Image: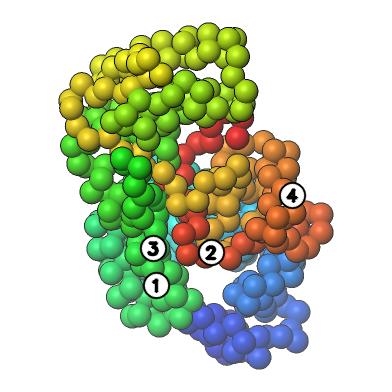
């Protein structure tokens, strides 16, 4: 490898894409094409970067299998950065295995972390956690140690383990500073800020309180009857009842919890559960049926009593009742939560992260664009959606699977 290629590679390793381009911008050999592609990816030109990395992979000969595997890893990294999450896991796994077999453990580990961070973005936390536990972080260079801690912190934050996440991010910051890569330091700082902003709201006795992720963790551990409107659960005394697949029952449970210790009027329950302003005898009959179903679902932790004007929630533990809600609640809050990381997402990637159909996600994005809440740029397959986070904005930290009909 000649001196210019070596110097360009070192510049990219410390996050200096312009320095790398100065050395290889006019060259058309395979190593230079690969380095130019990585440099353009660091500058945010993902389409040209992907094209250059693919040209480099074709330019390397069949015998240069390690170089071709590195190109596959680079292309996966570009896809992750541009939020194209539908790439083939098998292709990256094969490249990782090739790199390991030829002694390139650093790039092999990097391929593993790309796969883990993709799993985290699409909500497969168990798979991401298992893959992370299988890696030996002690032998890695500082940059990869920082990425390891970032990945672990991302999992901890989605698991609502804020204190553990903060410790991991402190270690990630030390490793990132040691690596001397500004973009990595900035990413750690961004996640640390996320721990201190509003992640949810607590609603109890008609009062609202903003909560950070650490305060959410404390609330979930407290002896309290809690209706979790972030993950569509009802919990008390260690028991959890999931209503994620029963949106009508969850709407009734939340309305009863927000009204506690008073009862919730029948007409208000009908409006919340059935989305109608006009109640007739058929709605009241349906309400009785749904209340019966809710009573059966939560019978181990609460009773629901009929009153002259409506229904009242009565926890069996006699604990205080509260509702845990998202910072901002609207029809397309889940889509906004995915976009809240300020990265540019394709509609297919949003659909993959939410486990929803791309057609429904596209309709949601169009509606949000009409109300100036998101912006689109590009055309066709290159079209991306972007939103800038604002104080009190909904986040992906407490994002569950969507309710049916969302």
Labels 3 and 2 touching (C-beta < 8 A)? no
Q: Is 79 displayed left or right of 193 in the figure?
A: right
Circle 3 sits on which residue? 197
Name the N-terminal-most of marks 3 and 4: 3
Alpha carbons under labels 3 and 1: distance apart: 13 Å
Q: Is residue 148 left or right of residue 342?
A: left
Mark 4 and mark 1 lie on one chain; the one further toward the N terminus is 1
Residue placed at 35% from the left, 42% from the top?
206
Residue 4 position in % (x across, y down) = 61, 89
Q: Quadrant of the C terminus?
A: top right
In the rendering, at what x and y percent does residue 325 appear? 41, 44
Q: How is the image coloured?
A: rainbow
Q: Which residue is mark 4?
A: 366
Tag 1 or tag 2, which sits nearer the N-term? 1
Is label 2 in a helix, a strand or a loop?
A: loop
Q: Are marks 3 and 1 in contact (CB under 8 Å)?
A: no
C-alpha gap between disc 4 and disc 2: 18 Å
What is the C-alpha distance between the residues marked 2 and 1? 15 Å
* Disc assigned to residue 189: 1
Label 3 to label 2: alpha-carbon separation: 11 Å
> Does 256 appear above or below 183?
above
Residue, x 35% and y 25% (percent of image)? 263
């Amino acid at each position: 490898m000649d001196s210019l290629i070596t110097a360009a590679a070192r510049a990219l390793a410390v996050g200096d894409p312009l320095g790398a381009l100065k050395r290889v911008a006019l060259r058309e050999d395979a190593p230079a094409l690969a380095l130019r592609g990585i440099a353009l990816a660091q500058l945010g030109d993902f389409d040209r970067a992907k094209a250059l990395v693919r040209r480099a992979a074709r330019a390397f000969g069949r015998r240069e299998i390690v170089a071709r595997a590195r190109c596959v890893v680079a292309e996966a990294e570009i896809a992750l950065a541009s939020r194209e999450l539908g790439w083939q896991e098998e292709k990256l796994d094969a490249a990782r295995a090739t790199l390991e077999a030829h002694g390139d453990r650093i790039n092999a580990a990097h391929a593993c972390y790309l796969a883990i961070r993709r799993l985290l973005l699409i909500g497969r936390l168990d798979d991401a956690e298992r893959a992370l536990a299988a890696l030996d972080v002690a032998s890695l260079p500082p940059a990869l140690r920082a990425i390891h801690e970032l990945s672990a912190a991302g999992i901890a934050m989605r698991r609502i383990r804020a204190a553990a996440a903060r410790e991991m991010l402190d270690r990630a910051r030390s490793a990132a500073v040691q690596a001397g890569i500004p973009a990595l330091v900035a990413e750690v700082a961004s996640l640390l800020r996320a721990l201190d902003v509003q992640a949810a709201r607590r609603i109890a006795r008609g009062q609202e309180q903003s909560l950070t992720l650490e305060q959410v963790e404390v609330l979930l551990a407290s002896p309290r009857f809690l209706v979790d409107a972030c993950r569509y659960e009802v919990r008390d005394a260690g028991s959890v009842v999931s209503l994620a697949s029963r949106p009508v029952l969850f709407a009734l449970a939340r309305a009863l919890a927000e009204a506690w210790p008073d009862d919730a009027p029948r007409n208000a329950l009908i409006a919340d559960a059935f989305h109608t302003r006009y109640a007739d005898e058929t709605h009241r009959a349906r309400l009785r049926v749904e209340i019966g179903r809710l009573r059966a679902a939560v019978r181990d932790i609460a009773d629901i009593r009929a009153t002259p004007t409506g229904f009242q929630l009565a926890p069996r533990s006699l604990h205080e009742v509260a509702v845990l809600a998202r910072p901002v609640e609207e029809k397309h809050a889940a889509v906004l939560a995915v976009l809240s990381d300020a990265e540019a997402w394709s509609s297919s990637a949003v659909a993959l992260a939410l486990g929803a159909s791309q057609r429904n996600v596209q309709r949601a994005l169009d509606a949000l664009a009409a109300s100036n809440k998101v912006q689109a740029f590009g055309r066709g397959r290159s079209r991306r959606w972007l939103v800038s986070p604002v104080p009190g904005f909904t986040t992906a930290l407490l994002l569950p699977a969507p309710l049916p009909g969302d």
